[in-house]
């Protein structure tokens, strides 16, 4: 029950009336000076709205101040009787509109040495940070979108609400942890019970479509050094989508209207569970065909064989082309014409279905020594022999490039986590990446629901 509502109302109405009168007086004075235009009106509106907002915040605080509870805790959870230690103790709750000032009595347990306000449970603030759930969601959103310092600047500039960069970091990582933990739990459940998560339909009942899975890894700078002194660790990223959710934009351009990203800062053993769960959500087992597109990393294809043994495996054409170009530079160090001709012959052979000829041609051109940074092209082509039949893939309408996952690397990870000077803890980087994948998968509602259900 709320007491004194009439007093709260009359007090607030008087203030609102005074603000409106002041606004109209300012408008008349500005008009009399010949300066009444849309820009001056906007300034005056801003002042009035800010005053209204202050009244609203104070009014919200007064409502809680006058909240009468039917029951209050007399005893601590440990069994010790609670002692009132302070009356009308002020707490300021950060909302998306500013601080809400609330006064409430404080109780204390002498055994547990803990205290709290008698209406704190009813207030339902988020965690220990004295902020609303709405503000929590806003800070998490800003934290995954912008560097923490810039996020604080943007929030103050756009809303007038001032928070610290450290609070944005703390909140976004805490929310990210909740999202990541939930994803891992769901992934573990799908992994432990594949017969439930991926019910296999008979082929004739499966949906006529192709489910694509694209996988890549990229290096992110961390605060942890390995045995070689390097602080760069691999962030694995997976993308799952159905060809029915792809719109052709141009000759070689497409828009994926429905997709899901998953990310993992570490080894393949946990990442594969996240990817498997995402594939299950997308309809693996109920869709006629599964296609995996990746670069030449062995871990990708080993994982594919384990998770999706029935998948069509395609080596990313652009990755192949890049490796051929790099390899050609050690064969033709000073002959650009000869180098381009050699590259064209290899690529033409592969794209016209003459893969074995291309492999023999590469073997015949093998240099005496291959630098460490260059792949052994003969081994590379031989190991991926069954994944580079691009003539067949094109005839069947398969996507042969992983441009979507390359774009995902830039959008999901690089633009937020690989800016100049950034170094991440393993956990912090993972939690922000978890929020990034939700955002770029158009699943931010999952984050909002998680915050409001906490």
Image (cartoon, rainbow, N blue to C red):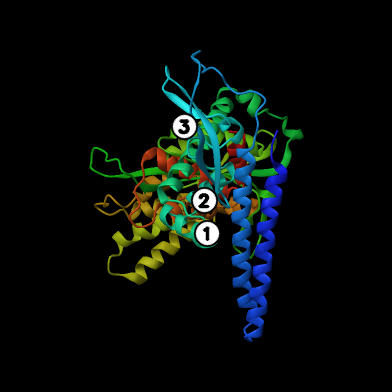
Looking at the rendered structure, the number of numbered marks drawn on it comes to: 3
Cα–Cα span, label 1 and label 3: 42 Å
Q: Which residue is mark 2?
A: 405
Residue 13 appears in the picture as rendered: yes
Does residue 85 appear left or right of residue 258 in this picture?
A: left
**Residue shown at 23%/43% (left/top)?**
229
Residue 198 lies, in percent from the top left, at 64, 29
Residue 291 lies, in percent from the top left, at 59, 43
Most distant residue in the top direction: 79
Most distant residue in the right direction: 205
> Where on the picture, by quarter, is residue 32?
bottom right
Which one is earlier in the sequence, the residue at label 1 or at label 2?
1
Neighbor class of circle 1 (other Cα within 10 Å; few <14, some 14-19, many 20+) is: some
**Residue shown at 61%/77% (left/top)?**
39
> What SS does tag 2 mark?
helix
Q: Which residue is mark 1?
A: 160
> What SS does tag 1 mark?
loop
Neighbor class of circle 2 (other Cα within 10 Å; few <14, some 14-19, many 20+) is: many
Cα–Cα span, label 1 and label 2: 37 Å
The mark lying in front, picked from 1 and 2, is 1
**Residue shown at 68%/65% (left/top)?**
20
Which one is earlier in the sequence, the residue at label 1 or at label 3?
1
> Where on the picture, by quarter, is residue 345?
bottom left
Q: Which residue is mark 3?
A: 270
The mark lying in front, picked from 1 and 3, is 1
């Amino acid at each position: 029950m709320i007491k004194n509502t009439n007093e709260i109302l009359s007090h607030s109405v008087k203030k609102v009336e005074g603000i409106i009168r002041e606004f109209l007086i300012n408008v008349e004075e500005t008009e009399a000076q010949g300066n009444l235009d849309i820009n001056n009106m906007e300034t005056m509106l801003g002042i009035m709205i800010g005053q209204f907002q202050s009244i609203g915040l104070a009014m919200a605080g007064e409502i809680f101040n006058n909240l009468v509870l039917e029951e209050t805790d007399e005893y601590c959870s440990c069994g010790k009787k609670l002692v009132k230690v302070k009356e009308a103790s002020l707490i300021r709750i950060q909302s998306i509109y500013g601080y809400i000032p609330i006064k409430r009595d404080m109780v204390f347990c002498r055994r547990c040495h803990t205290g709290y306000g008698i209406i704190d449970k009813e207030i339902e603030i988020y965690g220990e940070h004295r902020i609303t759930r709405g503000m929590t969601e806003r800070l998490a959103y800003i934290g995954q979108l912008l560097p923490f310092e810039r996020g604080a600047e943007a929030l103050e500039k756009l809303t007038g609400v001032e928070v610290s960069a450290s609070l944005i970091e703390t909140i976004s990582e805490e929310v990210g942890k909740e999202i990541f933990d939930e994803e891992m739990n769901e992934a573990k459940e799908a992994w432990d019970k594949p017969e439930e998560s991926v019910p296999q339909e008979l082929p004739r009942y499966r949906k006529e479509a192709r489910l694509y899975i694209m996988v890549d890894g990229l290096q992110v700078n961390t605060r942890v050094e390995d045995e070689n002194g390097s602080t760069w660790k691999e962030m694995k990223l997976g993308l799952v989508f159905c060809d029915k959710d792809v719109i052709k934009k141009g000759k070689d351009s497409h828009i994926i209207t429905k997709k899901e990203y998953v990310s993992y800062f570490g080894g393949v053993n946990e990442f594969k569970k996240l990817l498997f769960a995402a594939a299950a959500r997308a309809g693996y087992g109920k869709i006629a065909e599964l296609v995996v597109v990746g670069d030449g990393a062995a871990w990708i294809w080993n994982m594919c064989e384990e998770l999706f043994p029935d998948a069509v495996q395609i080596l990313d054409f652009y990755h192949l082309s890049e490796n051929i170009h790099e390899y050609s530079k050690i064969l033709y160090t000073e002959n650009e014409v000869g180098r381009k001709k050699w590259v064209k012959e290899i690529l033409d052979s592969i794209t016209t279905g003459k893969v074995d000829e291309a492999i023999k041609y590469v073997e015949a051109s093998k240099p005496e020594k291959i630098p460490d940074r260059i792949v052994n092209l003969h081994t590379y082509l031989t190991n991926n022999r069954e994944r580079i039949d691009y003539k067949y893939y094109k005839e069947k309408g398969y996507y042969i490039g992983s441009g979507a996952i390359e774009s995902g690397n830039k959008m999901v990870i690089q633009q937020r986590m690989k800016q100049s000077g950034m170094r991440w803890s393993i956990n912090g980087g993972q939690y922000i990446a978890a929020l990034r994948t939700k955002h770029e998968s158009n699943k931010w509602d999952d984050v909002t629901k998680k915050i409001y259900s906490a």
